[in-house]
Image: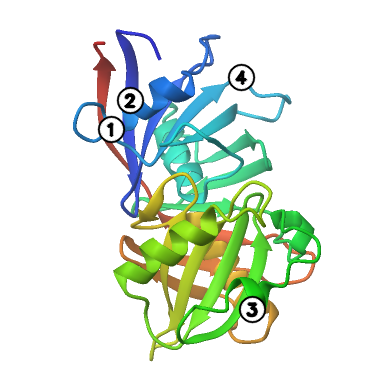
Amino acid sequence: MSPNQSFTKLEALGNDFVLLDHRDGQPDPGPERIRALADRRSGIGFDQLLALHPGTADADDCRVHIFNCDGSPARQCGNGMRAIARWLADEQPGRDRFRLATPAGAVEVEIRGDNQVRVNMGRPDFGAAAVGLEPGLALNDLLAGIPGRLDAGLVSMGNPHLILLLEQPPTAALVEQAGSHLSRHAGFQDGVNVSFATRGDDGAVRLRVHERGVGPTPACGSAACATAALLIMTGAAKSPVNVDQPGGRLVIDWPGEESPLWMTGPARRVFDGTCLT
């Protein structure tokens, strides 16, 4: 991202993004530059940077490069997909469906009313290899010190997720400390997103997430998808599942088996700007 380049700030359930339109061939900023831009005091501030490039197939509206605020690349970002769809709909009035190419595969997005966006997140994968867990490493041993744990599971939504089902909502300290330790554990090839989930009296899932490369965030779309998929797969919940995070609610609809999983939630364009330095 060079001086005088325009950008757009977007947010989805408090998960915030900077979008760069690089479909003209501009290069993406390097890790050091991304970290500087992500600084919430001296930069723009964001959880993830989303860079748009020309699509790799005729059906693609664009190809998306995703970077965490620490400069590391990511393969998928559910809230980010909704934010991009919101931006594309603003730029192309009258269109309400788009196809985004990501490192995790193509994603279909649909604009709904009331700022809602529906995203086809593909099929969840429950295999340990899909999340990069080291062969022979027992998950129960890894999680031995987590208080109030009822169950746990691994799910890939194109990016890796570790879900902890707890008796009681986690404290902020547990999310920060256990999340930081587990997200960077050497037993996961590329780190892992860590979710702490409980069930509310109304049947909704209460979720707190520690994202790899970011930390605790108000919301994580792919984590909500992974958590709901695990509950549906184990018979602990029926589709659709309401997932409540500090930033708000997502609705996850997954019929199961070979069907794709759909996520619905809000996204908003916050402001447009120009980077001066």
Three-letter residue code for mark 4: Pro
Q: Which residue is mark 1?
A: 39
**CA gap, disc 3 to disc 1?**
38 Å
**CA gap, disc 3 to disc 2?**
40 Å
Q: Position of residue 229 (x, y in %)?
A: 63, 70
Q: Is residue 157 visible?
A: yes
Q: Position of residue 136 (x, y in %)?
A: 80, 66
Is 171 above or below relative to 192?
A: below
Q: Are marks 2 and 4 in contact (CB under 8 Å)?
A: no
The residue that appears at 25% across and 21% down in the rendered structure is 273
Q: Which quadrant: the N terminus? A: top left
Mark nearer the viewer, 4 or 1: 1
**CA gap, disc 4 to disc 1?**
28 Å
Density class for disc 1 (Cα within 10 Å; few <14, some 14-19, many ≥20) is: some
Q: Mark 2 vs mark 4: which is more N-terminal?
A: 2
Q: Secondary structure at mark 3?
A: helix
Three-letter residue code for mark 2: Ala
Mark nearer the viewer, 3 or 1: 1
Q: Are marks 4 and 1 in contact (CB under 8 Å)?
A: no
Is 252 above or below relative to 133?
A: below
Q: Which residue is mark 2?
A: 36
Three-letter residue code for mark 1: Asp
Q: Mark 3 vs mark 4: which is more N-terminal?
A: 4
Q: Which residue is mark 3?
A: 232
User: Mark on residue 54?
Assistant: 4
Q: Secondary structure at mark 1?
A: loop
Q: Are marks 1 and 2 in contact (CB under 8 Å)?
A: yes
The residue that appears at 56% across and 70% down in the rendered structure is 163
